[in-house]
Amino acid sequence: MKGKTALITHLIIVLAAACPIFSQTITVTKARIGCLDIQTDGNLTGLAGRACNGRTSCSYKAPTEDEYKRAGVTARTRTFCTQAMEVTYRCGATEFHTVTVPGDAWKQPPAQLVCTPATPVSTHPPTPNAITVSRARIGCLDIQTEGNLTGLVGRACNDRASCTYKAPTEDQYRRAGVQARTRTFCTQAMEITYQCGHNDFQTVLVPGDAWSHPPAQLICNPPPASTRDLPPGTGVISVTKARIG
C-alpha cells in the first residue's frame, strides 16, 4: 500500500508541475509611485505591467515625475515628501512579492522583479532499492521554494544505492544554468529530497554556505535478505523463549 501511495503522490506532483497555472512568470498586481502613505491606489500598475508581465525577470526603473505625468499618471504628493515606488507582483498562481524603491525613486537603482522558473519535480521513475531525487534546491531556502537543483543532483545520484553530493558554489551552479533566490546576509543552504524505490521520502539538509560543508549523503539500504538464503549460524536474531527462575 505504501508503494502505491508513493507512486500516486509522484504522479500528482508531476502533473502539477506540467500544468500552465504553475508557470513562474511575472504578473504585476499593483504598482504605485508618489508619497506612499497617501498614494494608496496602484497608479503605476499599467506601466509596470506592460514592461514586466509575462517575463521571468524584469528590471524596472522608476519614471521621473515628468515621465509618468506624460504617460497620463497622477500621483499624490506633498511638500517635503520624496516619492517612492512600490511594485507588488505574482509569480505563477500564488507566490506574491513586493519590491520598494525609496524616494526619490527615479534616482535609485531599478526595482528587480524575479520569478525563479518552475523546475518540475523529477519525472524519473523510481528504481527498486535505488535513489530517485524528487527535489533539490540551493539558495536562501525560505524564498527559494522551487527545486532549482533537481536536475543536477538527479543526474549525479539517480539509480544509485548511495551517493555523495557536494553542493556547488555560486559560480559553479550559475555556469550550469541554475538561478537561485538570495538576499543580503543570507547564507545559501542546500536541501535534497529523495526516495528509495517507492518508499517514503527522505530529506537531507546542508546548512549555508553549503559548499563549505561536507557533501550530502544519500543512502538507500538494501532490503534485508531472506533468512532462507543465509548460512546456518548467521542472520537476524529472533528470541523465541526466555525465562528466569
Image (spheres, helix red, strand yellow):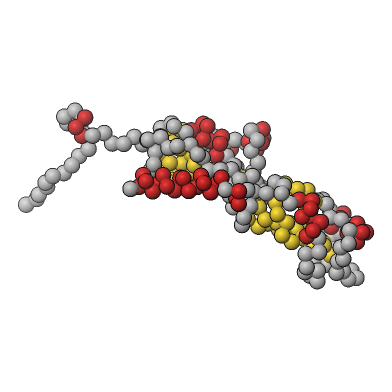
| Front residue (pair 104, 60) | 60
Q: Give the x, y percent position of residue 188.
A: 61, 45
| Front residue (pair 94, 213) | 94
Q: Give the x, y percent position of residue 84.
A: 82, 61
Identify which residue is drawn at 53% across, 49% down.
16
23 up-or-down from 30: above or below = above
- Give the residue furthest to the front: 20
Left/right placement of residue 159 relative to residue 206 reads left
Q: Give the x, y percent position of residue 11.
A: 46, 45
Identify which residue is drawn at 21% across, 29% down.
229
190 up-or-down from 75: above or below = above
Left/right placement of residue 195 relative to residue 112 reads left
Identify which residue is drawn at 28% across, 36% down.
224
Identify which residue is drawn at 33% across, 48% down.
1
Left/right placement of residue 61 relative to residue 152 reads right
Q: Is residue 144 visible?
A: no
